[in-house]
Amino acid sequence: MSKKLFIIILSIVLGLFLTSLVGYYFILQSSNATEPGGISSTFRNFFPFGNNTSTTTEIVEPITTEPNQSGQPQNYTQKLRKLSSEPVAGAGLLDVKAGTLVRHIEKATGHIYETELFSPNQNRISNTTIPLTYDAIWGNKNNALVARYLTEDNKTIETYGLLIKNVSTSTENTMSAVKLLGNIDEVSVFENSVFTLEQKDTSSVGYISGFDGTKRTQVWNSPIKELLSQYVSAKTIALTTKPHQDNNGFLFFVDTGNGQMKKILGGVLGLSTLVDNQATRVLYLDQTNTPGLFVFDIKNKLSKDITPTTFPEKCVWGKKNAGTIYCAVPEEFIDRDSLTSWYLGFVSFTDNIWKYDLKNNTSSLVGSLYTESEKQIDVIKPLLSENEQYFVFINKVDGSLWSYDLTK
């Protein structure tokens, strides 16, 4: 073989080799790229899709202790404290000896953070990137949550139980994820139990299970489909028809033991509710004429109005004092269509915090959120610590997470 021919053959071989390397590189890039609809394939690979709910995905990762990952202020002693600048899907509270801990999950990344309200410390306890978290509800002493995600069509919601383990160790923690069965329309939790409401063609069906989907038991089956749930106690789930100012609303209690249903309220225009922790009283909005806020005593079947008026969605019942309610109350006037418009995102409000004392039939202004923050804050998903020191909430305007010290 001549030297010239050898050089030609060697050049061709090298060229083919380099071409294959370039092609392989772009194939890898394509496989790691965002899927149609803007959803990262990292999310697709993390969860066990399909109908095999017995399969769980477990991830072991280092605990990070970098403070201020979500941009909370250094001054933890202030009355109103911003815990996250990034939009938050949901938060949970836990009281320990030192004080109150808050855990939250970011919408964009799925990263989970823990904040000490009694110190400036905030640690990221999960580095797993799970994008497009739509909603999250915490339970099991903040060691589990139900998280809801958008699928590839950016419309369908899928629901997963996430369990965090070994978070107290200094080197690693684990997270397992289980897809919950069904076309789930509504979720609520109580301690270690999850209630899910599925939409069928002609009915809605409710189930109780663990966060891992086990011990699944049916407790509800009804032609009524448009419902909101509140897992009140181990024995009681409250189901309220979705509110609209032109529709009569109903509130039902479901016994978790035998599935028996009892009507508590009915025929109330635009009904919106919040049941107390003992399932003995109901805070509700009546939009029959000018919207009014009422408390219904279930045993005595008596209602009394309280002022100022707000949405039950902005309220929490007291933990130490059953006759106390803390609410975010809009400065703006509430019309008959305000709640519907607020749900649809057509309007937003600037809220103040009020305390209602049912025993003494009084209400008092606790603080102005705008004065404290110089920002418009429209409260959603409010939480109250067990010691009643902290009122924690998400700002509907930008999804940021805040805490308010009620003792200052």
Image (spheres, helix red, strand yellow):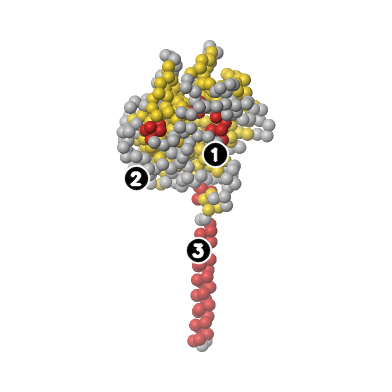
Q: Which residue is mark 2?
A: 66
User: In this view of the protein, can residue 317 be seen by the observer?
Assistant: yes
Q: Amino acid at mark 1?
A: Thr
Classify residue 195 as left or right of residue 141.
Answer: right
Q: Element type at marker 1?
A: strand
Q: CA distance from mark 3 to mark 2?
A: 34 Å
- Residue sitting farthest toward the right: 202
Q: Earlier in the sequence, mark 3 or mark 1?
A: 3
Q: Which residue is mark 1?
A: 159
| x, y percent for residue 352 | 43, 28
| x, y percent for residue 240 | 57, 25
- Residue sitting farthest toward the bottom: 2
Q: Amino acid at mark 3?
A: Tyr
Q: Which residue is mark 3?
A: 25
The one of 117 and 396 positioned closer to us in this rendering: 396
- In the image, is residue 403 above or below residue 50? above
